[in-house]
Amino acid sequence: MSKVRKARKLRTPNVPLAVGPTKPVSEDSASAVRGQVTEPIFDYTHTKRDLARIGMLAGIFIVTLIILSFFIR
């Protein structure tokens, strides 16, 4: 890997810059759309699975340390 870094203004973010319709909206449909607010839908199933796995591993390690502490004494 090189140690050359891009200038901050040349970097691009990994997130989309705009959310919503990308084509221009006509005046007739704009008045109907103004009342509706669309919110992004996020999918956290992978994150929940990872957190459950981390919690399970942490619990196993804590129980293992407690069991080992009885053998050390």
Image: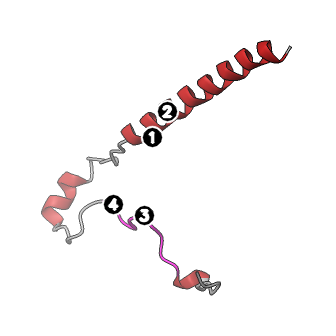
Asked if residue 48 is among those painted magenta in the image, a careful observer would answer no
The percent position of residue 25, horizontal first and vertical second, equals: 19, 67
Looking at marks 4 and 1 on the same chain, the residue that comes earlier in the sequence is marked by 4
Front residue of 16 and 36:
16
Q: Amino acid at mark 4?
A: Val
Q: Which residue is mark 4?
A: 19
Q: Residue at x 57, y 30 (%)?
A: 57
The percent position of residue 16, horizontal first and vertical second, equals: 38, 65
Neighbours of disc 3 within 10 Å: few (<14), some (14-19), many (20+): few
Front label number (2 vs 1): 2
Q: Is residue 4 left or right of residue 21?
A: right
The single residue placed furthest to the left in the displayed view is 28
Looking at marks 3 and 2 on the same chain, the residue that comes earlier in the sequence is marked by 3
The percent position of residue 43, horizontal first and vertical second, equals: 35, 42
Q: Which residue is mark 3?
A: 15
Q: Residue at x 26, y 53 (%)?
A: 34
Q: Is residue 59 left or right of residue 49?
A: right
Image: 66 above or below 51:
above
Front residue of 62 and 64:
64
Q: Does dot 3 land on a helix, a strand or a loop? A: loop
